[in-house]
Image: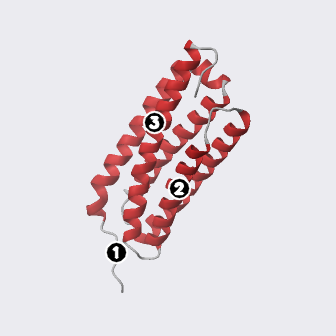
Amino acid sequence: MVADIYRPGEWTNFFLLVGTGAVTLTGLVFVAMSLNLNVVASDATHRFRAINTLAALALIFMRCALVLMGGQTHKSIGAELFVVCGISAAIFVRGYTRAMKSSDGLTLSRIVGGSFVHLAEMIGAALFFFGYLAGLYIAAIAIVSNTCYMVTAAWLLVIGVFDQKTDPSPSR
């Protein structure tokens, strides 16, 4: 019998920290968005950025929560990370492409950067699934990078809403 390469005790604090941060940020973004709901709902850039940010942070939390469930192997965790990241990537790409078609406020660099982070995590998850411990490190770094990326998206959302409230022709 081959020993599993995954040692949950070595990763518990990491996933607790990232998951707690993601769910906390999700709540803060939701409150900030709710305070400016009319502006967010009426502008495609803000609307899709809000959807992407909330979905991405919630799905980061979901990945961390799933990893923390007991009795799993590297295969189950690799599969969970891959599938949930794939869902996050699909929401991200769909939202940004729709926003780019509907408005002029988004740049291609945002979709490329976010897609790269999702792809890196999926590659890491696949490597981990097939027994390469380095894959979990790649996925973990991508999850943290994605969290940071969503913080910048939340900031751009807040600034964009503020600009639109104070100036009828905002730069986003």
The residue that label 2 is drawn on is 116
Which residue is drawn at the image coordinates 41% and 70% (left, top)?
A: 74
Local packing at callout 2 (Cα closer than 10 Å; few below 14, some 14-19, many 20+) is some
Q: Quadrant of the C terminus?
A: top right
Q: Which secondary structure, mark 3?
A: helix
Visual colour scheme: secondary structure
> Which kind of residue does numbered mark 3 sit on?
Thr
Q: In the figure, residue 137 lies in which quadrant? A: bottom left
Which residue is drawn at the image coordinates 60% and 21% (left, top)?
A: 170
The residue that label 1 is drawn on is 5
Q: Quadrant of the N terminus?
A: bottom left
Q: Is residue 39 left or right of residue 75?
A: right
Q: Is residue 119 left or right of residue 8?
A: right
> Which kind of residue does numbered mark 2 sit on?
Phe
In the image, residue 10 lies at what x, y percent? 26, 62
In the image, residue 115 lies at what x, y percent? 56, 53
Viewer-nearest residue: 44 or 82: 44
Circles 2, 1 touching at the beta carbon (< 8 Å): no
Q: Is residue 102 left or right of residue 118?
A: right
In the image, residue 120 lies at what x, y percent? 49, 60
Residue 59 appears in the rendering: yes
Q: Which mark is residue 26?
A: 3
Q: In 3D space, how far apart are the residues under numbered discs 1 and 3 (Cα atoms)? A: 32 Å
Viewer-nearest residue: 84 or 104: 104
Residue 73 appears in the rendering: no
Viewer-nearest residue: 14 or 134: 134
